Image (cartoon, helix red, strand yellow):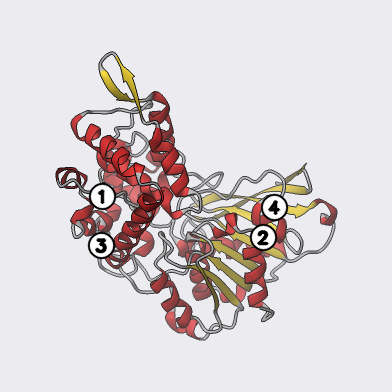
C-alpha cells in the first residue's frame, strides 16, 4: 500500500515492503521495511531512473527532509529518489529496548540482531528493487555506513547497480575491529588538538567539567548518568564540519552558581542528554562493532580494549598531570549500557554480540577486483570516523573506482558541501571530471 503527498517542490510517496528476516530462509519469518520515494514536483509523471540512498549509521533511519534541501535537490534533477529506512531503524521493524523483548531473552535478541548487518541490508535492497524499477538496475548513494553497505552491494549483487557513489564510507575490506580503533584514536587526538588550538579557553573548561564529574554523581534528566567517560564521548561532534564550534558553545556556559556552590546548569545537562542518549538509535550501539566482524574473532568491545593502549585519554590522569582532557570519538563501550536508560535492558544482548565468533564476510575481494559498475567515492582527508588509509587501500582494490580525496569537507561533506559533492562524484562515474 502506498500513499502520496506534496511538500514544496517535491512529491513524496510512502512505501512498505515485506522481506525475509533471514534471506537464506525466504519462506521463514518476515519483517517490514519502510521507504519514502521523492520526486521533483514538475517531474512526478516522468519515467526517471532511480537513486537509492543508504543512510549512515548503523542504526539511523533515512533523513526526514522537508522540501529539497542539501544533496536531495541535486539528485531530484535527474532521479526518482528512494530514502530507505534500513532494517531495524525508523519505520522498518525498529529494534529497541521496547521491541526486542518480543524476540525473547538476550540470546534470542542477539541471534535476531545478527541479521541486521550490511549483507542483509543489501539483500533487502535487491528484494524491493524489482518492485520499484521493474528489474532495472539503480544508482546507489551511500553515506558513511551507507558506503559500507554499497561496497557490500558491489560484492554481493553488482547486477543490481547501474552506478555507485560513496561519500565518507569506503571500509577496510579485511581490518578487524581492533585495527579500526587502533587507527582511530590517533585521528581523534588530532581533532581534539585542532579544537583546542581553535578554542584554547576550552582546555580549562573541559578540565573543570571533567574534574566535577570525577567527584560528583550527576544524573541527567531522564536518568542518564553523566560520567567523565560519557562527557569525553561528546568528542563525536568533532568529526562534523561545524562540530568544533558546537562543542565550544556547549562548554562555554556549563556551570551556574547555586546556594550549594557551582553546579552543571540545567541547560547544559539537557543539551548533553540529547547528544548522549541512544533512545532514538539504540541499534547503533548494539551492532556498531559487529559491522567490522568478518571471521571467527569476536569484536569483544574492541574500542574499550584498544583505548587502554592510549593512556592519554584517561581523564583522571590528565587532570592529575595538568594535561588537557581528551575527548573521544565514534566508539561504543560497555559502560554505555549502564549509564544510558535506553540501553540498560540490552546489556546482556550486547555482551553476547560482542562475544560472537561466527561472523560471515561482508566483502568479496575477488568480485571487487573484477568490478564493472561505475563507482566514485569522496574520501575526506583525515576523516575522524573512517580511516583515510583504509579507504584508499580499498579504493585501489575495487576495479575502476575513482576517488576524490579532499580536505575541503569533514565526514558530513554530503550535507555541508551539497550539491557540489554529489555533482563531482556523479561526474566521476561518467568520466567527465
Question: What residue does disc 4 label?
Answer: 37
Please, is residue 187 above or below residue 91 in the view?
below
Q: CA distance from mark 3 to mark 1?
A: 11 Å
Task: Answer yes or no: is residue 298 visible.
Answer: yes
Residue contact at pointers 2 and 4, CB within 8 angstroms: no
Question: What residue does disc 2 label?
Answer: 419
Q: CA distance from mark 3 to mark 2?
A: 40 Å
Question: What residue does disc 1 label?
Answer: 351
Q: Secondary structure at mark 2?
A: loop
Number of the front mark, 2 or 4: 2
Number of the front mark, 2 or 1: 2
x 72%, y 66%: residue = 134
Snapshot quadrant of residue 312: bottom left
x 42%, y 43%: residue = 247
Looking at the image, tell me whether mark 2 or mark 4 is earlier in sequence order.
Answer: 4
Looking at the image, tell me whether mark 4 or mark 3 is earlier in sequence order.
Answer: 4
Question: What residue does disc 3 label?
Answer: 298
How crowded pointer 3 is (Cα within 10 Å; few <14, some 14-19, many 20+) is rated as: many
Q: CA distance from mark 4 to mark 1?
A: 37 Å
Q: CA distance from mark 2 to mark 4?
A: 19 Å
Q: Secondary structure at mark 1?
A: helix
Residue 151, percent from left and from top: 50, 71
Looking at the image, tell me whether mark 2 or mark 1 is earlier in sequence order.
Answer: 1
Looking at the image, tell me whether mark 3 or mark 2 is earlier in sequence order.
Answer: 3
Instruction: Tell me if 58 is positioned left or right of 259 in this view.
Output: right
Amino acid at each position: 500500500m502506498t500513499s502520496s503527498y506534496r511538500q514544496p517542490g517535491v512529491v513524496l510517496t510512502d512505501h512498505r515492503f515485506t522481506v525475509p528476516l533471514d534471506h537464506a530462509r525466504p519462506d521463514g519469518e518476515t519483517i517490514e521495511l519502510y521507504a519514502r520515494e521523492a520526486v521533483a514536483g514538475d517531474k512526478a509523471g516522468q519515467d526517471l531512473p532511480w537513486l537509492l540512498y543508504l543512510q549512515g549509521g548503523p542504526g539511523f533511519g533515512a533523513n526526514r527532509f522537508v522540501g529539497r534541501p542539501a544533496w536531495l535537490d541535486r539528485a531530484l534533477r535527474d532521479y526518482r529518489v528512494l530514502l530507505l529506512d534500513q532494517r531495524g531503524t525508523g519505520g522498518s521493524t525498529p529494534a529497541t529496548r521496547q521491541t526486542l523483548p518480543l524476540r525473547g531473552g538476550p540470546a534470542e535478541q542477539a541471534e535476531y540482531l545478527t541479521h541486521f548487518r550490511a549483507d542483509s541490508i543489501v539483500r533487502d535492497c535487491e528484494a524491493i528493487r524489482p518492485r520499484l524499477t521493474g528489474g532495472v538496475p539503480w544508482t546507489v548513494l551511500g553515506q558513511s555506513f551507507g558506503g559500507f553497505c554499497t561496497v557490500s552491494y558491489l560484492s554481493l549483487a553488482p547486477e543490481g547497480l547501474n552506478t555507485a557513489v560513496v561519500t565518507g564510507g569506503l571500509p577496510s575490506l579485511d581490518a578487524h575491529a581492533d585495527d579500526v580503533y587502533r587507527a582511530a584514536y590517533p585521528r581523534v587526538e588530532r581533532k581534539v588538538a585542532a579544537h583546542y588550538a581553535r578554542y584554547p579557553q576550552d582546555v580549562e573548561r573541559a578540565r573543570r567539567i571533567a574534574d566535577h564529574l570525577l567527584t560528583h554523581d550527576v544524573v541527567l534528566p531522564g536518568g542518564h548518568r553523566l560520567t567523565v567517560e560519557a562527557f569525553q564521548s561528546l568528542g563525536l561532534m568533532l568529526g562534523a564540519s561545524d562540530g568544533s564550534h558546537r562543542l565550544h558553545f556547549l562548554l562555554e556556559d556549563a556551570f551556574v552558581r547555586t546556594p550549594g556552590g557551582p553546579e552543571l546548569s540545567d541547560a547544559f545537562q539537557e543539551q548533553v542528554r540529547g547528544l548522549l542518549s541512544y533512545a532514538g538509535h539504540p541499534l547503533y550501539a548494539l551492532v556498531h562493532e559487529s559491522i567490522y566482524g568478518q571471521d571467527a574473532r569476536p569484536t569483544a568491545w574492541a574500542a574499550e580494549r584498544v583505548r587502554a593502549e592510549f593512556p592519554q585519554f584517561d581523564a583522571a590522569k590528565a587532570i592529575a598531570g595538568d594535561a588537557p582532557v581528551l575527548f573521544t570519538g565514534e566508539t561504543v563501550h560497555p559502560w554505555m549500557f549502564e549509564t544510558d536508560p535506553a540501553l540498560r535492558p540490552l546489556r546482556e544482548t550486547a555482551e553476547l554480540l560482542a562475544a560472537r565468533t561466527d561472523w560471515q564476510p561482508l566483502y568479496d575481494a575477488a568480485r571487487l577486483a573484477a568490478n564493472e559498475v561505475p563507482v566514485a567515492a569522496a574520501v575526506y582527508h583525515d576523516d575522524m570516523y573512517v580511516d583515510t588509509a583504509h579507504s584508499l587501500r580499498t579504493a585501489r582494490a575495487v576495479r575502476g573506482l575513482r576517488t576524490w580525496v579532499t580536505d575541503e569537507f569533514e565526514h558530513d561533506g554530503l550535507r555541508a558541501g551539497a550539491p557540489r559533492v554529489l555533482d563531482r562524484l556523479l561526474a566521476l562515474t561518467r568520466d567527465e571530471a
